[in-house]
Amino acid sequence: MNKKDISQISNWLNEIIKGSFHIEIASSDASFRTYYRITYNEGTDIVMHAPPDKESLKDVIKINSKLESANVTVPKIKKVNEDLGLILMSDFGTKVYLDNLNDETVFCLYTDAIDVIHNMQNNITTSDLSYFDIHEQKDEINLFINWFLKKHIGYDNDKLGDMGIEKILTDLLGKIDEIPKKFIHRDYHSRNLMLLEKGNPGVLDYQDAMTGPITYDLVSLLKDCYVKWDDELIKKMSKTFFQRLDLKTSFDVFNYWFDITGLQRHLKAIGIFSRLNYRDNKPAYMNDIPRTLSYIRETVGKYDELKEIKLVLDGLKLE
């Protein structure tokens, strides 16, 4: 644990908590944030530390309020110190979805999680949220190009230019931008959902929420970078989700939207995993690249209009 951070947190908690308390690491994630579990006479809470020079707490607080108003189960924010980048919030415990998913539990747990997606899309206003537009999507695609293709694989600009990969991916983003838009959590997967006895699931890591494609959170959940399910399960749950929507289009069209938003997301994820390795000294995320890449290969192999992307990927010898 960072001694300076612990000292800072301890001094702050001394102003809030009466009596003694114990601090331990709860988790860290793919950002600069770190989470600490605080044990004291009233039970446990979580302190989130987001270095103020790296991340603002404003979006955390704003989206937390939106989700809470829609009766989505999110941590209750108890105290905030924006200058120090600290939030004291309720503790959802240690039962992460990822650790509790198996062939027997997946339908029940995912049904709860999909209900929350519907709730977020139907009951959260997005007029004050940024759009997940082509510019934002392209910034994410550039993570794949810069950190994976250039840094990890070793391609230079001339090589990438010869492949034409930037134009191919830009065409993809135009298709994604045509998908109907609603509230999107943007990181809705098994490591950000907590298994709870009441109000399941507990939803975490929502500060990057935007207005974006209606398929985005669903594909984040069903084509998770950290756990993989068979095509039959994914199609069945996607169809159930689709049937609850008021869309004047076919399931085949919806499924195409599902696949291409997943393609964009998975390209971004591979870029982030590579950046975590090379910039942040977190090499464990590289282990998730083969699974994530398998989703990409499956998707580009399904559609003729994505064959150019398939040809580029086939030529990269990424494994």
Image (spheres, rainbow, N blue to C red):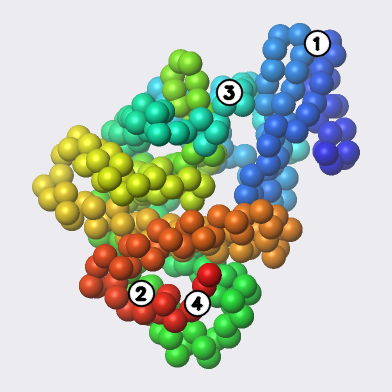
Residue at position x 60%, y 56% in the image? 287
Residue at position x 47%, y 87% in the image? 161
Point out the frontmost of discs 4 and 2.
4
In terms of sequence position, does the residue under pointer 2 or pointer 3 come before the other? 3
Amino acid bearing label 2: Lys
Amino acid bearing label 1: Lys
| Residue 244 visible at all | yes
Q: Mark 4 and mark 2: span between their CA atoms?
A: 12 Å
Q: Mark 4 and mark 3: span between their CA atoms?
A: 42 Å
Q: Mark 2 and mark 1: span between their CA atoms?
A: 60 Å
In terms of sequence position, does the residue under pointer 4 or pointer 3 come before the other? 3
In terms of sequence position, does the residue under pointer 3 or pointer 1 come before the other? 1
Residue 286 coordinates in the image, percent (x, y): 61, 59
Amino acid bearing label 4: Lys
Q: Which residue is mark 3?
A: 92
Say if mark 4 contacts mark 3, CB within 8 Å: no
Q: Which residue is mark 2?
A: 310
Residue extending farthest to the front is: 103
Say if mark 1 contacts mark 4, CB within 8 Å: no
Q: Which residue is mark 4?
A: 317
Q: Residues within 10 Å of mark 1 (few under 14, many from 20)?
A: few
Secondary structure state at the residue bearing disc 1:
loop
Residue at position x 87%, y 40% in the image? 4
